[in-house]
Image: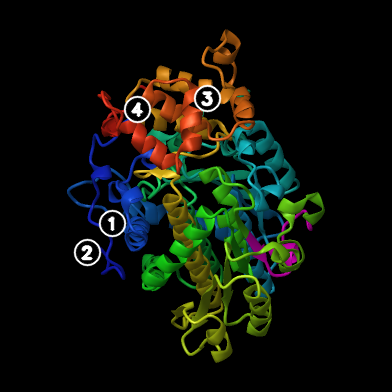
């Protein structure tokens, strides 16, 4: 669909989807709905997989349909106005950095993005000889940058403590809490603290559900729900003392996987907002046209990135082959692209119940390049070893032909260093791929092309914009790399059999959000009511067919701790429900099946079954 309101879009966005219609999976928030585009994702070949995920990403840029105005979109007047209003508040901090602070906070993917953005804009300020005024908070601390620690998002009190610590002595703070599905207790606690201290704090909630869809169940050890806090912010937004920035970008290509579209949209929104603020602080008049031009650069990134769809599909296929053979996917990155690679790798652990060694990211000069607050975390263990040197000493000796290695860099990096490491890797495996970013007029050296005959070289036009132009291009390259890696790792796990239709059916039950999502998946695939699905999940968690009252009545946090000790908790529960069998039998069937998806497919086809995944449209209404 081509834009008609302000200008023609750079890309073709999908026509308004079924998900936008009133009544579509109405009990579920947008972030948990099933995207109609990818309904048959598990049956797609590699080229189709890339096209379907590309189309899902394009939904970020959809405008409102005049005949279906159920949600605010990125280009809605109200969203553009909110961006401009928040940018003015950020501008005030930029112009008075000694007494003010801009805090970005998030959990998991959102926290890693907070690290990336805070460091990027501090770098921008230092280049202008200004005092840096950005900082980040990530649930679980710096360890969560390079390892999956999802349970830390369930602690609102810890969130408040971390915020107070970060802002000590500051007279004015713009706090930006990122929670894509408006659900993280860690962020809710911080926003609540801001609302009680509006003389110092300006709270901004960033996410992609409406406030009415925000999570509304009880948070352990706390007195409020996320929705209650979000409603308080929304109620005073007209006074510009607090803001909710929440355009709808559509359901994820993989149901509930907000690391993908939600993460990308967060990056686009916040970088645009900050760039507008910095332009205004340099006495440049910032109009809506300027704002739209910045957003256009991200549309252009989508078009440029997916023009390489065939090569992305080839990388996806090779990565899937490695994972199917119990091999590994290693992403060796330079600069901020190294952090993008680490982000994608870490997110595979909770998203697909992957082992932390299945997909790993490494960054040139390790923690020095990451610029994290706590410095070098390598002494904490092998999971925290993320430098190229760590790869060479600890991983490269065991690399085999079953493994796939991806080099992720720009032609502004030291290509001689890249080639040197490539040569060492090619002695171990021929499955070596390149994702390289170039500016118009730059070309990959012939020597590199000889080593990697079919690289993905993404060439960007020169941006004739002041100092910020170089940063916009960096942001484009980061987003482009994220889109490629998201597509590759998501697609690889589809081919590995971790997805049924577009539902992830083997993820870790590592926090309260994942516990709820697991119950919802069980409802949608089996058609059973919430109570029966919860029982099946608990039976799988505890490995007991008969649950004690203590098990039934325990807090969700106890269930999550128990789930950590078992593998394939959700798949066992699904097969048990579909076959009406014990969890012991379900686990046996899974172990003898070629994949989780295959076990679920065969269970759906059991003679005599009357209800199945067809009930996906109505399941979940009892939540």
Which residues are the magenta region? 361-376
Circle nearer the N terminus (2, 1):
2
Q: Secondary structure at mark 1?
A: loop
- Marks 2 and 1, Cα distance to the nearest angstrom? 9 Å
Badge nearest the viewer, 2 or 3: 3
Q: Are marks 2 and 4 in contact (CB under 8 Å)?
A: no
Q: Is residue 169 above or below residue 368?
A: above
Badge nearest the viewer, 2 or 4: 4
**Looking at the image, can residue 13 be seen?**
yes
Mark 4 Cα within 10 Å, few/some/many (few <14, many 20+)?
many
Q: From the viewer's side, name the closer residue of 491 and 339.
A: 491
- Marks 2 and 3, Cα distance to the nearest angstrom? 52 Å
Image quadrant assignment for residue 71: top left
Q: Position of residue 482 (x, y in %)?
A: 50, 62
Q: Which residue is mark 4?
A: 526
Residue drawn at 33 percent across, 30 percent down: 27
Judged from this view, the residue extending furthest toward the left is 67
Q: Secondary structure at mark 3?
A: helix
Q: Position of residue 619 (x, y in %)?
A: 32, 28
Q: Which residue is mark 3?
A: 540
Residue 11 is left or right of residue 184, and the answer is: left
Q: Which residue is mark 1?
A: 63
Q: Position of residue 44 (x, y in %)?
A: 32, 54
Q: Which residue is mark 2?
A: 4
Q: Are marks 1 and 3 in contact (CB under 8 Å)?
A: no
Image quadrant assignment for residue 345: bottom right
Q: Secondary structure at mark 4?
A: helix
Q: Are marks 4 and 1 in contact (CB under 8 Å)?
A: no
State yes or no: residue 363 in magenta.
yes
- Marks 1 and 3, Cα distance to the nearest angstrom? 43 Å
Q: Where the N terminus falls, by quadrant?
A: bottom left
Mark 2 Cα within 10 Å, few/some/many (few <14, many 20+)?
few
């Amino acid at each position: 669909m081509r834009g008609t309101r302000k200008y023609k879009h750079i890309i073709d966005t999908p026509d308004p989807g079924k998900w936008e219609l009133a009544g579509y999976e109405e009990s579920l928030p947008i972030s948990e709905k099933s995207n109609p585009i990818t309904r048959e994702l598990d049956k797609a070949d590699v080229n189709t997989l890339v096209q379907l995920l590309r189309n899902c990403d394009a939904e970020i840029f959809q405008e409102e349909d005049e005949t279906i105005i159920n949600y605010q979109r990125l280009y809605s007047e109200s969203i553009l106005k909110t961006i401009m209003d928040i940018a003015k508040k950020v501008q005030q901090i930029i112009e008075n950095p000694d007494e003010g602070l801009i805090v970005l906070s998030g959990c998991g993917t959102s926290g890693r993005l907070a690290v990336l953005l805070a460091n990027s804009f501090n770098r921008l300020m230092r280049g202008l000889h200004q005092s840096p005024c950005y900082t980040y908070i990530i649930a679980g601390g710096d360890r969560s940058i390079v390892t999956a620690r999802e349970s830390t998002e369930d602690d609102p009190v810890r969130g408040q403590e971390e915020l107070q610590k970060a802002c000590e002595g500051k007279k004015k703070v713009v706090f930006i809490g990122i929670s894509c599905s408006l659900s993280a207790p860690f962020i809710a606690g911080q926003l609540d603290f801001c609302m009680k201290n509006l003389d110092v704090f300006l709270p901004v909630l960033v996410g992609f559900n409406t406030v009415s869809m925000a999570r509304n169940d009880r948070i352990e050890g706390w007195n409020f729900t996320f929705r209650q806090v979000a409603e308080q912010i929304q109620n005073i937004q007209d006074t510009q003392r607090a803001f909710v920035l929440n355009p709808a970008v559509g359901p994820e290509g993989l149901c509930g996987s907000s690391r993908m579209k939600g993460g990308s949209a967060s990056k686009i929104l916040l970088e645009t907002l900050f760039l507008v603020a910095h332009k205004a602080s340099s006495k440049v008049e910032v109009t809506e046209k300027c704002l739209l031009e910045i957003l256009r650069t991200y549309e252009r990134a989508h078009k440029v990135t997916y023009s390489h769809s065939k090569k992305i599909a080839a990388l996806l296929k090779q990565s899937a082959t490695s994972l199917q053979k119990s091999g590994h996917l290693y992403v060796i990155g330079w600069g901020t692209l190294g952090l993008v690679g680490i982000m994608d790798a870490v997110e595979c652990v909770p998203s697909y119940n992957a082992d932390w060694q299945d997909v790993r990211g490494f960054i040139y000069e390790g923690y020095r390049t990451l610029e994290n607050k706590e410095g070098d975390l390598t002494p904490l263990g092998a999971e925290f070893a993320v430098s190229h040197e760590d790869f060479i000493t600890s991983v490269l000796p065991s690399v085999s032909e079953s493994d796939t290695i991806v080099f992720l860099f720009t032609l502004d990096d030291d290509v001689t260093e890249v080639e040197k490491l490539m040569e060492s890797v090619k002695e171990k495996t021929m499955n070596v791929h390149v994702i390289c970013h170039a500016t118009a007029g730059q070309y990959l050296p012939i020597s590199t092309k000889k080593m990697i005959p079919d690289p993905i070289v993404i060439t960007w036009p020169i941006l004739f914009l002041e100092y910020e132009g170089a940063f916009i291009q960096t942001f484009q390259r980061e987003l482009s790399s994220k889109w490629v890696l998201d597509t590759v790792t998501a697609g690889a796990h589809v081919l590995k059999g971790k997805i049924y239709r577009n539902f992830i059916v083997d993820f870790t039950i590592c926090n309260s959000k994942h516990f709820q999502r697991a119950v919802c998946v069980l409802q949608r695939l089996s058609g059973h009511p919430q109570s029966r699905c919860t029982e099946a999940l608990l039976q799988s968690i505890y490995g007991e067919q008969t649950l004690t009252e203590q098990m039934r009545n325990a807090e969700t946090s106890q269930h999550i701790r128990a789930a950590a000790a078992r593998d394939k908790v959700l798949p066992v529960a699904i097969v048990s429900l579909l076959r009406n069998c014990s969890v012991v039998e379900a686990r046996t069937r899974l172990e003898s099946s070629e994949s989780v998806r295959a076990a679920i497919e065969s269970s759906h086809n059991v003679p005599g079954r009357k209800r199945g995944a067809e009930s996906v449209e109505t399941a979940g209404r009892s939540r």
